[in-house]
Amino acid sequence: MKRIGSLLIFVAALSACGADTEGKDKFGITLYKFDDTFISSVRSAMEDHNKDKAFLNFADGQSQQPTQNDSIDTFIVEGYDGLGVNMVDRTAASVIIGKAKEADIPIVFFNREPTAKDMNSWDKLYYVGAKAEESGRIQGEILAKYFKENPKADKNGDGILQYVMLTGEPGHQDAILRTEHSVKALKNAGLSVQQLATDTGMWQRVNGQEKMAAWLSAYGDDIEAVLANNDDMALGAIEALKAQNYFQGDKMMPVLGVDASAPAIDSLKEGFLYATVLNDSVGQGSAVLDILTELQKETPDLSSLPHTFTDTKYVWIPYVPVTQDNYKDFMKK
Ligand code: BGC
């Protein structure tokens, strides 16, 4: 194990030597996995925002916490100036925090929120994210409006909205809170609701498609709406619905996601996805870099940044509803 560890450090050292790091701040950014649509867009946003100012080195956590911990070790040995961390397991941040604290390298966590206890264990820790309850509430409000304005949406006419729910990774704050608050918003709007089925799709499109196909065979036309914790799973569900001839004639199904990813905006444009909620990857990626950069200054002044800090260490980037009315504003330029 040790040998593999040293080899990794050696390889990373070589690649850092080859890159042009001269005089630049060096930031090590570790992502829970590269292969995630939203996280890829945060990475691109960081690269765009950076414009080659700092040296950024991205590491793939491959959904394995030990792999991510190894990358942190490498960044520390390499003398990186700051760390951007998208935890694999958000409850396991204390190990990483311990290492960074010992080496006095600040960390900006993002997208996967460590526990408050961990966040309060050192003053050079920050978190950039979005209030997941807000995205759930927005989803629920959009669906409630649709259901109220379209009497035919209540297919069996029982006055109850029957829905299925595709949830993200268990334990992820966005999965827990979006699920809870979307349903709460439906109820707050005065609707009676019934959940026909729910399961985790682990944020992935292929799982959204498989679960939806199974639910369509079990419940068919009893399903009146599909709520998904993110766009990838919503788009998977849409594939399964298309295979059952939905979205033709008056065979409609409102499917709602979160993220406003590029493929989701396309789907909205084509009339498949009913609505989504912008999870602002540009806002989040930029804030992570801004904080890391400011912390390199002799006397950092975070209040000079265009971000609002809550409890001195949290930056919350707002969610925005995206529907037929405004999706054009969110198309990639
Ligand atoms: C996004 C998901 C993504 C997850 C990764 C969430 O905020 O909505 O699309 O898979 O973060 O942690």
Image: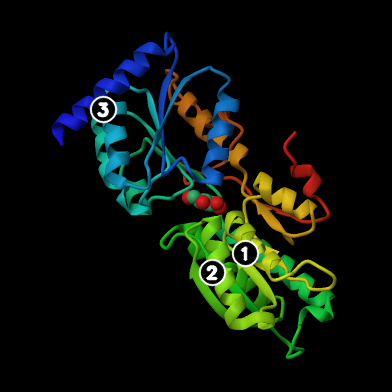
Quarter of the figure that contains the C terminus = top right
Does the numbered disc 3 mark a residue whose Cβ is under 8 Å from ligand 1? no
Q: Position of residue 28 (x, y in %)?
A: 39, 28
Q: Position of residue 247 (x, y in %)?
A: 78, 66
Viewer-side label of 3, 2: 2
Q: Residue at x 25, y 25 (%)?
A: 9
Residue at 46% across / 28% down in the picture? Answer: 292
CA gap, disc 1 and disc 2: 8 Å
Q: Residue at x 15, y 30 (%)?
A: 3
Residue occupied by mark 3 = 8
Badge 1 residue CB within 8 Å of ligand 1 = no
Asked if residue 173 is positioned above or below residue 303 in the image, the reply reads below
Residue lying at 74% horizontally and 88% vertically, measured from the top left:
156
- Say which amino acid is labelled 1: Ala
Q: Between residues 167 and 182, which one lies in front from this camera angle?
A: 167
Provide the residue designation for mark 2.
Answer: 211
| Number of disc labels | 3
Which is more toward the observer, 65 or 233? 233
Q: Is residue 299 left or right of residue 162?
A: left
Q: Residues within 10 Å of mark 1 (few under 14, many from 20)?
A: many
Vertical arrangement, residue 45 with respect to residue 204, above or below: above
Disc 3 and disc 2: Cα gap in Å? Answer: 39 Å
| Residue type, numbered disc 3 | Leu
Are the residues tagged 1 and 2 within 8 Å (C-beta)?
yes
Of residue 98 and residue 276, the one placed in the foreground of this image is 276
Rendered location of residue 186, percent (x, y): 67, 74
- Number of the front mark, 3 or 1: 1
- The disc placed on residue 237 is 1
